[in-house]
Image: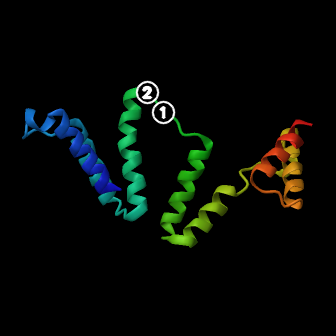
Amino acid sequence: MLRTLIALVSGALIATGAWAQDKDKPTAQQEKMKSCNAQASKKDLKGDERKAFMSDCLKADSAKKTGEGKELTAQQRKMKSCNAQAGKKELKGEERKAFMSKCLSADSGQGEDKLTAQQEKMKSCNAQASRKELKGDQRREFMSDCLST
């Protein structure tokens, strides 16, 4: 992934002639790549964690330029927190997947007594579809009918 990203950036720079203009001065994208790489190395990130970090780091710059991504959503904050916890525990593979699943589905302060009417209906319809062992299109059709009544 990282090599692919570097290759794509290099290819884009060659195609636009950016290297031909000033070989001694790195472009803004090259500077950002260097900065993100240094940060990832400083954090001693490896494998998928490094790829995810590099992707986020490189996207962050473009989000700032377009005014996007100023604040994380609740789900993004939860994902970030769970990911950090898994990193601290040095979890890998299936163990990490299981941890992330449990962490992300953990109750975020909303007890089941606080479900909205729509959530209650969804829960009920989902349970019915499971009892009937419906799958795929049949399940979707059943859920649509159940939720619309």
**Residue farthest to the right?**
149
Image: 7 above or below 86: above
Q: Quadrant of the C terminus?
A: top right
Left or right placement of residue 32 versus residue 110 in this view: left
Q: Which label number is shown at residue 67? A: 2
User: Which residue corresponds to mark 1?
Assistant: 70
Q: Which of 17 and 57 is in front in this view?
A: 17
Q: Which residue sits at x=7%, y=40%? A: 23
Q: Quadrant of the N terminus?
A: bottom left
Left or right placement of residue 106 versus residue 119 in this view: left
Q: Which residue sits at x=8%, y=36%? A: 20
Residue 10 placement (x, y as % from top left): 21, 45
Image: 35 above or below 102: above
- Asked if labels 2 and 1 touch by Cβ distance under 8 angstroms, the answer is yes
Q: Nearer the viewer, residue 23 or 61?
A: 23
Q: Which of 142 and 93 is in front in this view?
A: 142
Residue 60 placement (x, y as % from top left): 39, 39
Q: Nearer the viewer, residue 118 or 39?
A: 118
Q: Which label number is shown at residue 18? A: none
Q: Which amino acid does label 1 sit on?
A: Lys
Dot 1: element: loop
Residue 70 placement (x, y as % from top left): 48, 33
Q: What residue type is labelled 2?
A: Gly
Q: Which residue sits at x=74%, y=50%? A: 109
Left or right placement of residue 57 versus residue 77 in this view: left
Other residues around mark 1 within 10 Å, as few (<14) / some (14–19) / many (≥20): few
Q: Which residue sits at x=90%, y=54%? A: 128
Residue 7 placement (x, y as % from top left): 25, 50
